[in-house]
Amino acid sequence: MTKKYQVLGDVLLPNDTIPESFFIPPEEFSKWAYVKGAKTIHRISKKTGKSYTYKEGKIPFPDHKEMPSRTMLTREGGKHIAREKHVVLQNEQCRRLHPVELERLNGFPDDFTKCKGVTDCQRAFFMGNALVIGVVEKLSQ
C-alpha cells in the first residue's frame, strides 16, 4: 500500500542533531500532561459576575508520529509549556519540534528560515504563520 500523506514521523531529525534546549526535563512532564489534558473548570466572568463552565478536550501527549500533524500555530517556539506545541517521543526522550522539522511540516526546504540574527523561536513563529506549500499548490491547479 502506498502512503498518500505525510505523517509527523516523516519530518523528524535524529535526536543527536537536536540541541539540548528542545528536550523536556522529566520534572516538567506533569505540567505538560496537565496543559494537554482534558479539563472542566468552573469560572466566574470578571465582566458579568456570572458563572460558567470552561471545557477543553485532550490533546495527545506526546503527539502521534504515525498520524498527520496537527495544525501548527505561532506559539510553537520557545521553551514555555503550551497546549498547542507539538511534543514527540523519540528514542525514549520527549522534545519539542526543531525549526527544520517545522519547515518540513509546511513543505519548505530545510533551513528556509535560518538567517543571521533570527532565533529558533522566531523561526517557529514564521512557520506557525506560514501557509502550507502543498495547500497553495493544490489551490493553484
Image (spheres, rainbow, N blue to C red):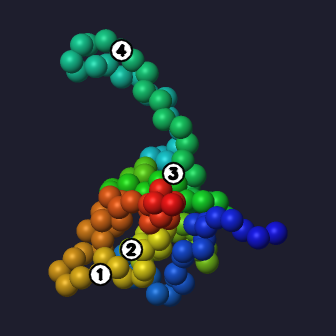
Mark 4 highlights which residue?
Answer: 51
Does the CB distance between marks 3 and 2 fall below 8 Å? Answer: no
Q: Is residue 121 visible?
A: no
Residue type at mark 1?
A: Lys
Q: Nearer the viewer, mark 3 or mark 2?
A: 2
In terms of secondary structure, where does tag 1 sit?
loop
Q: Nearer the viewer, mark 3 or mark 1?
A: 1
Q: CA distance from mark 4 to mark 2?
A: 41 Å
Does the CB distance between marks 4 and 1 fall below 8 Å? Answer: no
Tell me the crowding category of disc 3: few under 14, some 14 to 19, or many 20 or more residues within 10 angstroms, Cα based.
Answer: some
Mark carried by residue 125: none
Tell me the crowding category of disc 2: few under 14, some 14 to 19, or many 20 or more residues within 10 angstroms, Cα based.
Answer: many
In terms of secondary structure, where does tag 4 sit?
strand
Residue type at mark 4?
A: Ser
Mark 1 highlights which residue?
Answer: 114
The x and y percentages for residue 107 are: 47, 71
Mark 3 highlights which residue?
Answer: 33
The x and y percentages for residue 63 are: 57, 59
Tell which circle, 3 or 2, labels the residue nearer the N-terminal end: 3
In terms of secondary structure, where does tag 3 sit?
helix
Q: CA distance from mark 3 to mark 2?
A: 23 Å
The x and y percentages for residue 116 are: 19, 84
Question: Foreground: 133 or 14?
Answer: 133
Tell which circle, 3 or 1, labels the residue nearer the N-terminal end: 3
Mark 2 highlights which residue?
Answer: 99
Q: CA distance from mark 2 to mark 1?
A: 9 Å
Question: Foreground: 2 or 87?
Answer: 2
Hey, which residue is sitting farthest right in the picture? Answer: 1
Residue visible at 53% across and 37% down in the picture: 57
Question: Foreground: 53 or 72?
Answer: 72
